[in-house]
Amino acid sequence: MSLRSLPSIEAVLATPEAAALLQRLPRATLTDAVRAVVDQRRESLRSSEAVPDAAAATSPADIAREAARWVHRELSGTLPPVVNATGVVLHTNLGRAPLAPRAIESLTRAARAASAVELDLQTGERGHRDVHVSRLLADLTGAEGGMVVNNNAAALLLAIDTFAPRREVIVSRGELIEIGGAFRLPDVLRRAGAVLREVGTTNRTRLEDYRSVLSRRTALLLRAHPSNYRVEGFTEQPSRAEIAGLAREHGIPFVEDLGSGALVDLAEYGAPHEPTPAEAIRAGVDLVTFSADKLLGGPQAGLIVGRADLIQCLQKNPLKRALRVDKLILAALRATLTLYRTSTDLRAEVPTLGLLARSEAQLEELARRACGLLREALSSEFEVDVCPSQSEIGSGAQPTVTLPSRALRVQREGWDERRMAAFFRTAYPAILGRISRGHFLLDLRAVRDAEDLIPHHAEASRS
């Protein structure tokens, strides 16, 4: 097929298909769409690696129909819905935790009208937006107070900026973490104006290591959750209670960055135990920072709980205003936290906990149904079967632990696993699986319904 087979823009705009589109689209918008599709076809024909059927549809009517799909994709925005069949429940690139229905309802109500974000309705005076969640955070963690900022990195930044400008923060070398997006703890400390004081070694740090470097320049003792890695074997680390005792002895705040922030014992939901803010507070930690959009199952936010006097200092920092959340986040967060106070079945009301708690029997049943539906939707050239799989919690929670799952293995003669991944990824909504040992898999751990795995272009692939 040659480049001469491509129609002109005017030829495409003259088709009945384009005329129908022009009833609801400006001509300039459709012209841009047609030009984009023609350019894509041209590049495909020029490519030495072009897939034969990728550029086959080059008639004016075909181009017009593809232009309609192009407009739909473009106008649907850059945050299209996706089906998470990767096997990673809390996938950072996919927005982490799905919100609870009650949180979505609360967010929607707040979006529709004005809200008393910073207004005390009893007195008529200006209030503080953190009041909507501070009491709940304190009650759920056993802390004296709580507050919210826009993410956990911001929570840590605010704490360092408030208590340690131009002073030393003591951290074990085994906790100098780097997480997604090249977020490095030493860099955050430096940007906040603090001086990093490393103690111990990568695998072994003792309480005496902390004690030996304490001085008048010491502002904080900081403990950081390792998040996306584990140091195992010949290791040693002082307990929270030991570090807390040393901090109290010298009148220095002890801050812990817990990262994922589970509010409940995950062992009750089929996952390994993850440290909770309540455990840290009971052990004597003065301030605990953690995420709301990971194991807690809420919207993106950074939460801080701890001593009331320290929380007040954080609230007075001018940086707090730059890190505050809006009414939509507050509405969703309050609703999610309220569930932890009132729900008798969290796994049924908090989607993240429900996905983690799925049994192998439940996943097997879902996989069998999904397999049958996908076989019906695709052409006979596709092969679909159920296989065992291993899923992950994600977002730095229990990085060395996997959860037993089930997956659909999809194959087609002449297609490699990357082409299969692209086939599902370009569906609407996009279906994101994973490639494992030369096979394309659709893991069921984080998939809501079997019907979600049917790609919208399945009709075109039927025999």
Image (cartoon, rainbow, N blue to C red):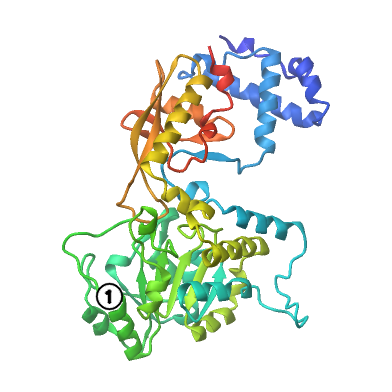
Displayed quadrant of residue 440:
top left
Category of crowding for the residue at label 1, using alpha-carbon neighbours closer than 10 angstroms: few (below 14), some (14–19), many (at least 20): few
Q: Is residue 388 above or below residue 294?
A: above
Q: Is residue 206 above or below residue 272?
A: below
- Residue that carries the numbered disc 1 in the rendered image: 239
Depth check: 331 or 33 in front?
Answer: 331
Where residue 302 sits in the image (x, y, percent)? 52, 66
Residue at image point 58% right, 63% down: 333
Classify the position of the N terminus by image quarter.
top right
Displayed quadrant of residue 323:
bottom right
Say which amino acid is labelled 1: Ser
Where residue 177 sits in the image (x, y, percent)? 35, 62
Can you see residue 372? yes
Q: Secondary structure at mark 1?
A: loop
Where residue 114 sits in the image (x, y, percent)? 77, 64
Where residue 357 sits in the image (x, y, percent)? 41, 50
